[in-house]
Image (spheres, grey):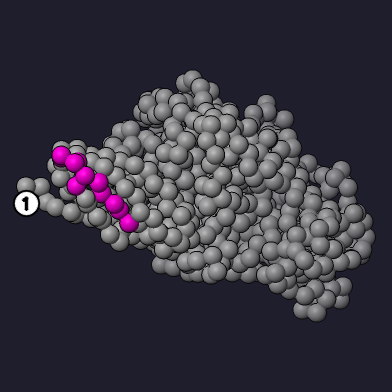
Amino acid sequence: MKFKHSAASSLAAILLALGCAAAAQTAPNAPLPSRQQARSFPGQLLFSRSLQKQVAAGKTSPSSTVPKATNQERRSLNITSYNLDLHLTPRNESLSAEARLTLRNDGTQPLREIALQLSSSLHFQGIGSNGHRLVYAQQTIASDADHTGKLTEADILLPAPLAPGASMPIQLFYGGQIPVSGQRLEAIGTPQSIAEASDWDRISEDFTGLRGFGSVVWYPVSSVPASMGQGNRLFEEIGRQKLRNSTATVTMKVAVEYFDQPPDVAVLDGRPVPVSAPVSMPTASFPGVVTVSLPTQTIGFQELSLVLASRQLSRQDHTNVFALPNHSANVADWLNAVAQVTPLVQSWLGPKPLVPLTIIDLPESDDAPAQVGTALLAPLTKTSPSALDAPIIHALAHAYFNSPRGWLQEGVPSFMVTLWLESTSGRKVALEYLESQRGALAIAEPASPGDSTGEPLISAWDPVYTRTKASYVFWMLRQLAGDQSLQTALQQYVPAKDTNTQYFEDLLERASGKNLHWFFQNWIYQDPGLPDLSVTNVFPNKVGLGQTLVAVNIVNHGFAAAEVPVTLISTTTKVSNYVRVPADSSITHRMEITGTPLEVKVNDGTVPEVGDSIHVVILKTKGSD
C-alpha cells in the first residue's frame, strides 16, 4: 500500500464518538445544533446521527419511510452553492465536515425526496434544513465516480415537495477517512500498484490531494451512478457535473492538524490560496493547526478540488514549483520547460497569466500527472525536457485563460498543445495528432439531426467535445478569421462578460471584420454532426496555351456545413482555394492552373469528418502522357 493507516487515536476522536451517541438520542424534528454548538470541542462535530439507532428506535424506516431516489430525481437536483467547513486530521487520514448547500429543482416535476452522495469511505452524520432535522436513509450504491467504486447515498425525505425551479437550503454533517484506494480499477483487473498510481487521492500527513467527482467524492453531489464498463457514460457524467458546477458558487474554510511540518502550499477549487501561520503549535500529545480559506466565488467548469502539501518552494517569474527534497535537483528542468513554452502561450493568450502557474510534486514517482484548475500535479522526477512540454503548456494555458464555458476552458489548452506540436514538429504532426482523436469524435456525433440533438459545443460537457472537437474548431477559425484575429479575441476575452451565447463570436467578428455566424451555427450553437465529404468528379478542360480549367464536384453527405481547402497540383505549380460546402448538398468548384493537372486534394485534416478527412484524386502521374 502507498500509505499505511496510523494506529494512533486521539482524544478528539473519543469526544466525537461521545457526541455522536448523544446526538442519536435527539428527536428527529428537533432543531439542528448551531455552528458554535457543533464546535464545543475544537475541530470536531458533536452532531451526528446513526441510521441504525434510528431504525432500532422506530423513528424511520429506510425501506418504507424514505423511498430510494430515481435517476430522474438525481438528475433533477442541482446544487447551486457550497459553503464547506472542513477539519482534516491527516494522521488518521480523516475529515469531518459541515456543508451548507443551496439545492434547486431543475426538473419538470416536484421532488418529494432527494438523494445526495459521498465517497463510500465517508458517511452522513446528520441532515437538516431551516434548523430542523430531515429524515434520511443511507445506502451504498455502485459508481465509479469515486476511487472506491462505490458511493454512500443519503435518500432524504423533504417536509414539503420542492417545486420545479424552486430552491431550498440544506445543512449536512459528514465525515470519515480517505486513504489511497485503487478499488475501482482493481475490480476490472488493474494491478494494485498501477491502480493506486492513477487513483492517488488521499488524506495523509505530507500530502492531501482530493480531485473531486470522478476521482474521490469528498463533497456532496447528486449524480447518476455510472461505471467504467458502460462505454463513455462515466466520462459523460463527470462532464455533466462539471457543467452543473460551472455557475455554482463555493466558500471554503479548512482547518488542518499537523504534528511534524505544516502544509505550506494549498489549492482550493483549483486556485492557490495562502496558508495561515499556525493557529496552535504541536506538542508531544496534541497537534498544531493551520487554516486555509477560499472566499465565495464561482466554481467554474471543473471538479471541486482540495490540495495541501509540505514542499520546498522554487519560484521563477510567474511560476511556483513545490518539490519534495529528493526532487529538488530536477526543479530546474521543469522551470526551463515552462520558460520554453511560455512565448507561444503569450503570443496567443496575452503577456501575463491571470494567476501564477503552480506545480506540485506528487508523493510517488509513478503517480499519474493531473491538472487541477491552474495547478499541475506531477511527480517531479528526472524527465527529458520534450516529455514535459505537453502537460506544461496545457497547465500554463489554464493559468493564462479561464472561462465558464467548457469548450473554451478545456478547448483553449488543448488547442495550445496542437500549436506547440505545429511549431516544434510541423503542421503534419499536429494534424496527425488531431486525426488520432477524430475517430472517438465521429462515434460520439449524431449520424443525422433526426437521430439525436447531439451535444452543442456551447453547452458541451463530454471531453470528446470540449477538448477534441473544440481543438478542431479553433483550427478552422484560424483559417476563417486568421491567426491575428483569433489571438486578439482570446486576449480580449473576459469570463465575467460571457453571459450570452454569442459573446465569443462577437469578439472574433469584431477582430476579423468577418461574419462568422454560419460557422458558429453549424459547429458551436447546434450539433448536426460532422460533414461527410467526397469528390464525385473532376473535369479538366484546356482553356489556353498551358492553362487548364479544372471543375471539382464535391458532395457533403453530412448535415454540417464546412469550409475546406481544395488544392490543385500540376506539373509546374500548386493552387489552393477555400470552399464552403453546404450541409447535405453538392457544389462544383472551378480552378485554373498552369501546367498539366496531376492531383486534386479536398480537405487537409483540419476539418473533422465522419470518415477520412483527406480526399485525393489522381488525374495523371508526373511524366505520363
Q: Where does residue 108 sit, x and y in percent of width and height?
A: 77, 66
Task: Decide: is 601 above or below 254.
Answer: below
**Residue drawn 79% across the image and 51% down it:** 102
Extent of the magenta region: 542-553
Q: Quadrant of residue 594?
A: top left
Which amino acid, mark 1? Asp
Few, some or many C-alpha atoms within 10 Å of disc 1 (few <14, some 14-19, many ≥20)? few
Can residue 67 be spotted in the picture? Answer: yes
**Residue drawn 44% across the image and 68% down it:** 188
Please give left or right for residue 593 compared with residue 157 in the image. Answer: left
Please give left or right for residue 287 compared with residue 406 in the image. Answer: right
**Front residue of 121 and 118:** 118
Judged from this view, the residue extending furthest toward the bottom is 64
Judged from this view, the residue extending furthest toward the top is 317
Task: Decide: is 341 above or below 88.
Answer: above
**Residue drawn 60% across the image and 36% down it:** 506
**Residue drawn 29% across the image and 44% down it:** 591
Q: Where does residue 576 sit, x and y in percent of width and height?
A: 30, 41
Q: Main secondary structure of the magenta part?
A: strand
**Front residue of 447 and 14:** 447
Q: Which residue is mark 1?
A: 625
Please give left or right for residue 14 compared with residue 333 in the image. Answer: right
